Image (tube, rainbow, N blue to C red):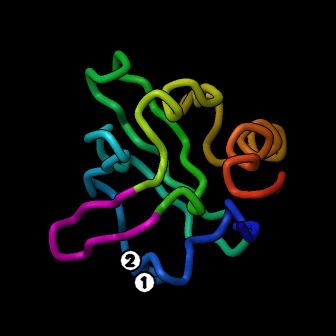
Amino acid sequence: MSSIDIWEFRSTSGQVPGTDLVDFHVEATDGPIGKVDKHSDEVGSQYLVVDTGPWIFGKHVLLPAGTVVRVDQEDKRIYVDRTKDEIKNGPEFDKDKHQDADAGSREAYGSYYGPFYGGLTF
């Protein structure tokens, strides 16, 4: 398996740079996890912040863009290749503390998600 840069959308995802993904529904491999609250299109630091609503008690989770398999622009759905449990067990994201993926949080997310994709990328 080749390594995937977790901080970049895959070229096969269908994500069009500049598209506003806020309010798109996010689907894990085993069901819905919430809606996009914020996202970054910045080269080398692309990610989604997902409001999980009641699923994990109104928490927000950060998903590096490399987790995105497909963006369905028409249905406003984003499909990721992680399960609900894998997402729930990832590093905590406090949207009041972190406005975006700073160096410290990038390292935590890289350490957690990187091994799923063949390496560590901060």
Q: Please report the residue visible at 71 percent of the width from the left and 41 percent of the height from the top.
A: 109
Image: 95 above or below 18? above
Report the number of numbered marks: 2
In this orientation, which residue lies closer to the viewer: 32 or 35? 32
Q: Main secondary structure of the magenta part?
A: strand
Residue range in magenta is 69-79
Q: Residue furthest front?
A: 1
Give the residue type at disc 2.
Thr
Other-residue count near label 2 (Cα within 10 Å), few / some / many at <14 / 14–19 / ≥20? few
Q: Are marks 2 and 1 in contact (CB under 8 Å)?
A: yes
Residue 20 percent location from the top left of the image: 36, 70
Rounded to the nearest whole Å, what is the CA distance between mark 2 and mark 1? 6 Å
Left or right position of 120 against 24: right
Left or right position of 14 against 116: left
Query: Where residue 19 is drawn, which disc sits there?
Result: 2
* Quarter occupied by the N terminus: bottom right
Residue 11 percent location from the top left of the image: 54, 83
Q: Please report the residue visible at 55 percent of the width from the left and 42 percent of the height from the top.
A: 62
Residue 27 percent location from the top left of the image: 31, 49
Q: Which residue is mark 1?
A: 16
Q: Please report the residue visible at 56 percent of the width from the left and 61 percent of the height from the top.
A: 65
- Quarter of the view holding residue 18: bottom left
Q: Secondary structure at mark 2?
A: loop
Indicate yes or no whether the magenta region holds residue 86: no
- Quarter of the view holding residue 13: bottom left
